Image (cartoon, rainbow, N blue to C red):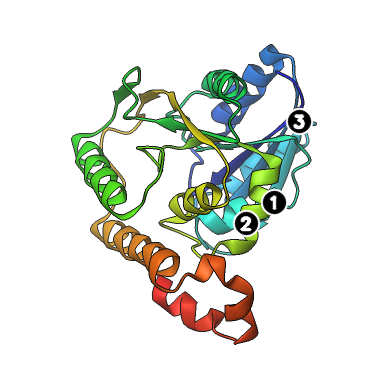
Amino acid sequence: MKGKFSVVIPVYNEAERIEKNLEEVKKTFDEFGCSYEIIVVDDGSLDGSYKIIKDLENKFSQLVVRKNTRNFGKGRALKKAFKYTKGDWIVWLDADLDLHPYQIRTLYDILVLNEADVVIGSKFHPNSKVNYPLRRKIISWGYYFLIRILFNLPCRDTQTGIKLFRREVLEKVFPRILVKKFAFDLEVLVNAHHLGFKISEAPVCLNSQRKFSRIKLRDIFNTFWDTLAVWYRMYILKYYDRINYYRRKGLRKELKRVRR
């Protein structure tokens, strides 16, 4: 694995497992033998997660810790973390470690083999092995069909919590992003594809650590609404093709209202 990897992990209320999980990420990358850093943004946790992570910062030289004053959402945490990354490759990894970081090697190998710019883990890949609550499975399949209808993306799963990007992709995509929470990953991938970056999928082994899903009905509604807002900006407003026009006209605040 050539180049430096920046592993970005947004954290919200993961006090029970975050220390063990960060130690596992460090151990895995030490075994890879590549240059790396771990950027963690605590997104306003209320359970003491930040203190645990901050204490680890003194223990791990590769660890960089930042904090949001309140829960702004995964997207904002990922964008904030990117400002502190120095790697050639940017990894997004969920803090719960339902997806073990050893799978990053698979994503990297597929990126090199396919000459891709983005590789995303997919629960729907034929070689994936997944174990997670039935409710999450139903929601995932429903969202998959919605995305398939609305967007012409070369991937089936936008939400799985392990992704690998060439740095250049996020440098060009992030200035275009409006969503900060529920459909953030989708908006990033839609824009990456729209800009001509190649996206590939990788099989994953997903083993949910939680017996029951934490997804709430309100989260489902907000994700659906944000998804429609991305579609509206892409195909009706043509916002992503006319960003400078909308900014000059001072309409960005109005567009944000469509998102929320």
Q: Which mark is residue 171?
A: 1
- Report which quarter residue 63 is drawn in: top right
Is there CB contact under 8 Å for labels 1 and 2?
yes
- The percent position of residue 180, horizontal first and vertical second, equals 51, 61
| Local crowd size for mark 1, using a 10 Å CA cut-off: few (<14), some (14–19), many (≥20) | few
Q: Residue at x 77, y 32 (%)?
A: 62
Q: Which mark is residue 59?
A: 3
- Residue 118 vs 78, above or below: the answer is above
In terms of image quadrants, where is residue 39?
Answer: top right
The residue shown at (64%, 43%) is 40
Crowding at label 3, few (<14), some or many (≥20) Cα neighbours within 10 Å?
few
Provide the secondary structure element on which disc 1 rests.
helix
Residue 61: % across, % down: 80, 31
| Direction from residue 143 to residue 12 in the image, left or right | right
Left or right: 173, with 85 as reference point? left
Whether the residues at callouts 3 and 1 have beta carbons within 8 Å, the answer is no
Label 2, residues with CA under 10 Å away: few <14, some 14-19, many ≥20: some
Q: How many marks?
A: 3
Q: Secondary structure at mark 2?
A: helix
The answer for how far apart the CA atoms under marks 1 and 2 are is 6 Å
* Residue type beneath disc 1: Glu
For the residues labelled 2 and 3, the Cα–Cα distance comes to: 31 Å
Q: Amino acid at mark 3?
A: Lys
Q: Which residue is mark 2?
A: 174
User: As shown in the figure, which amino acid type bears the numbered disc 2?
Assistant: Phe
Q: Nearer the viewer, mark 2 or mark 3?
A: 2
The mark nearer the N terminus, 3 or 1, is 3
Answer whether residue 99 is visible to the viewer in this image: yes
> Is residue 260 in view from this perspective?
no
For marks 3 and 1, give the CA distance. 30 Å
Q: Secondary structure at mark 3?
A: loop
